[in-house]
Image (cartoon, rainbow, N blue to C red):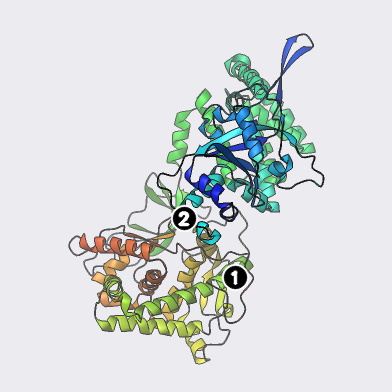
């Protein structure tokens, strides 16, 4: 656009950059028809146009721009898709004669997009209308076309115009020319962003199935929630839908008002017949009948027998996504609100909602031996589980929760090949972070911020501390030179809360073999890392930090005593971590156990792999994302300044891994990791 404008004749361009520019578009008919029944079989049809329809019929690939140049009008046709300018003063003068300059502009319109307007007839103009509508010219052009001209808007004259140069190159960056081009792109784009996404995106088979399921679910919700569909139809503003909506609301009112009161017995008999037919034929039509019975029986609730048909839906007829199930649940709750329910029963169900967990139990407070038990929580008390998984016996005293009990998942887990691929794609990110952190430690320009960060996370400020961190990073970098996917063991079956585990003995064997052998020493618990990868927006940098963390175990040869905790969800600025425990470890204020007055030594920070991994990520961020790093450093300093009795009070949340990373469409990496990062 800027290139086309900068090639305009000098005198004309001077006029467009210093004067008020008026823009016009050209469109086709946008006629719609509504019908009204007069009497008996006779109907009366009315043609109309709406602003929404006019916009859809407007040629998006061209416009006319006009400006007063002294005593005469200068007009140019601009075809945005072709980057083409054609001077057409005759067309501009024709619009002046027809009074279109005095018409209201489209950009000033703020009325109802669906309001009915009188159709406007097309007139003949000296234009090639196919260029406006399709961005191309037909083989044969008669010299004029019929269309409807509309005023788009006016760009006011620049307050402080800059002298125009006699150079296409210099005029390309002229602020007034940029302003003119931006006005055109913003108010008359070739294609909107959502249309571009739709055109460039080919839905997968899974997405098509989900779309189909959402449509079916919408039908069920419209069926189940009184007045929902009819209100939507009335609100649409479209004549035919408004008529249908009024009729639908009347029917819903009649249904709720009296038609189905006292129909419980009849509904049950109908549903019983329906169950019988569905069990024999198992057709979708039978499911619709069953759902209709439950939906239009708001007095008696859903019959128990209908549940059998509901299972057919689960077994293959209809599979709904989580948002769809939530929508259906909302429909059910709205029905409950409309006709009331046994609130006492719901309260009992809520109080009886027990959660199961692993834990340790001591028979009494003075007992030294503990037992590992499975327990269920009911009314804020823990009870042991019997062999059938039911609570029994008195409430357990002195029970310490360890971890939630994970039952076998009904949904299919992601294949191991999926996990292997995104871990493989994350290895170059990990290597890049190590290199970036090393460059920060060896660059004097980062000394002040670097030393402050090491003091906060490692508890020391001496130059020896920086050299020690640098030595650790170089050792990890050396390990990365020989690490490949053969050194990872992907376990899809193990039930644990950890994402990865480090095998020190296997690592030692790998080092003795020269650091190049296919000995697996990092175990990846695939369900957990898959969940993390998806929850964090498929961010490969998060996985890279996990790998770096595990390799630091090989350097320090110690288990962690403190971890940064993930803040749930995907943050706009990247991954969010609560580093309170790491700060207290560096301060020597991390308790050895809960309710303990004994604290870990601050020197343990150099033995804590998670402290070193977070430090590495922040050092890399110092080099690659200065703005976010400075914000994180301010948060850390503020937390240290506000510590109470020497202890940091959390949460202390920092942001990491905001940069976009490669996705699973990238091919597997070759030896050497040559992909750009």
Q: Quadrant of residue 297?
A: top right
Q: Position of residue 469 (x, y in %)?
A: 34, 80
**Relative side of 653 to 87, left or right:** left
Q: Position of residue 581 (x, y in %)?
A: 31, 65
Report the residue marked by disc 2.
570
Number of numbered discs: 2
**Relative side of 199 to 652, left or right:** right
- The answer to whether residue 637 is above or below residue 547 is above
Q: Quadrant of residue 55?
A: top right
Asked whether 383 or 523 is in front, the reply is 523
Q: Secondary structure at mark 1?
A: helix
Q: Position of residue 322 (x, y in %)?
A: 57, 46
- Comparing marks 2 and 1, which lies closer to the viewer? 2
Give the number of the disc on residue 420. Answer: 1
Q: Quadrant of residue 484?
A: bottom right
| Mark 1 nearby-residue class (10 Å; few <14, some 14–19, many ≥20) | some
Asked whether 285 or 353 is in front, the reply is 285
- The answer to whether residue 395 is above or below residue 516 is above
Residue 102 shows in the view: yes
- The answer to whether residue 202 is above or below residue 461 is above
**Relative side of 582 to 298, left or right:** left
Give the number of the disc on residue 132. Answer: none
């Amino acid at each position: 656009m800027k290139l086309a404008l900068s090639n305009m004749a000098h005198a004309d361009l001077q006029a467009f950059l210093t004067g008020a520019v008026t823009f016009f578009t050209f469109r086709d008919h946008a006629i719609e028809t509504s019908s009204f029944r007069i009497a008996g079989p006779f109907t009366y049809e009315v043609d109309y146009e709406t602003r929404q329809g006019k916009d859809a019929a407007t040629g998006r690939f061209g416009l006319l721009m006009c400006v007063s140049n002294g005593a005469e009008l200068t007009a140019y046709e601009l075809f945005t898709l072709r980057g083409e300018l054609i001077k057409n003063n005759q067309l501009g003068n024709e619009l002046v004669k027809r009074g279109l300059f005095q018409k209201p502009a489209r950009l000033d319109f703020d009325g109802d997009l669906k309001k009915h307007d009188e159709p406007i007839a097309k007139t003949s103009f000296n234009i090639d209308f196919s260029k406006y509508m399709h961005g191309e010219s037909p083989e044969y052009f008669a010299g004029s076309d019929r269309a409807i001209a509309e005023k788009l808007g006016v760009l006011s004259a620049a307050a402080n115009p800059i002298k125009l140069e006699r150079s296409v190159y210099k005029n390309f960056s002229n602020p007034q020319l940029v302003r003119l081009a931006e006005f055109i792109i913003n108010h008359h784009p070739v294609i909107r962003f959502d249309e571009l996404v739709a055109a460039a995106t080919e839905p997968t088979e899974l997405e098509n199935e989900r779309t189909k399921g959402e449509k079916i679910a919408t039908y069920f919700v419209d069926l189940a929630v009184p007045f929902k569909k009819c209100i939507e139809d009335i609100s649409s503003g479209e004549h035919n839908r408004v008529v249908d909506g009024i009729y639908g609301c009347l029917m819903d009112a009649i249904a709720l008002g009296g038609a189905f009161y006292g129909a419980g017995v009849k509904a049950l008999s109908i549903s019983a017949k329906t169950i019988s037919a569905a069990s024999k034929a198992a057709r979708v039509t039978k499911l619709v009948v069953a759902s209709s019975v439950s939906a239009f029986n708001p007095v008696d609730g859903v019959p128990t027998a209908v549940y059998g048909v509901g299972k057919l839906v689960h077994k293959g007829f209809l599979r709904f996504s989580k948002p769809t199930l939530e929508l259906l649940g909302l429909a059910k709750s709205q029905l409950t609100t409309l006709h009331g329910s046994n609130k006492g029963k719901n309260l009992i169900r809520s109080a009886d909602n027990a959660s199961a967990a692993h834990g340790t139990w001591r028979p009494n407070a003075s007992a030294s031996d503990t037992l590992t038990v499975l327990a269920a929580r009911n009314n804020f008390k823990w009870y042991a589980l019997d062999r059938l998984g039911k609570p029994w016996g008195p409430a357990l005293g002195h029970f310490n929760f360890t971890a939630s009990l994970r039952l076998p998942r009904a949904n299919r887990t992601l294949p191991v090949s999926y996990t292997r691929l995104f871990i493989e794609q994350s290895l170059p990110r990990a290597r890049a972070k190590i290199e970036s952190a090393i460059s920060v430690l060896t660059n004097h320009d980062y000394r002040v911020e670097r030393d402050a960060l090491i003091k906060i996370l490692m508890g020391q400020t001496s130059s020896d501390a920086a050299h020690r961190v640098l030595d650790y990073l170089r050792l990890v970098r050396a390990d990365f030179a020989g690490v490949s996917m053969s050194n990872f063991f992907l376990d899809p079956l193990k039930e644990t809360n950890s994402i990865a585990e480090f095998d020190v003995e296997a690592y030692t064997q790998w080092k003795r073999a020269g650091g190049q052998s296919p000995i697996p020493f990092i175990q990846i618990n695939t369900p957990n890392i898959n969940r993390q990868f998806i929850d964090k927006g498929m961010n490969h940098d998060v996985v890279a930090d996990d790998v770096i963390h595990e390799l630091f175990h090989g350097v320090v040869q110690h288990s962690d005593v403190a971890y940064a905790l993930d803040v749930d969800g995907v943050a706009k600025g990247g991954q969010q971590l609560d580093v309170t425990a790491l700060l207290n470890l560096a301060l020597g204020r991390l308790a050895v156990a809960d309710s303990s007055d004994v604290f870990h030594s601050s020197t343990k920070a150099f033995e804590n792999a998670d402290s070193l991994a977070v430090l590495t990520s922040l050092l890399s961020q110092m080099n690659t994302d200065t703005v976010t790093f400075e914000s994180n450093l301010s948060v850390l300093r503020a937390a240290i300044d506000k510590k109470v009795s020497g202890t940091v009070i959390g949460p202390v949340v920092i942001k990491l891994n905001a940069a976009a990373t490669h996705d699973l469409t990238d091919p597997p990496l070759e030896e050497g990791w040559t992909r750009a990062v």
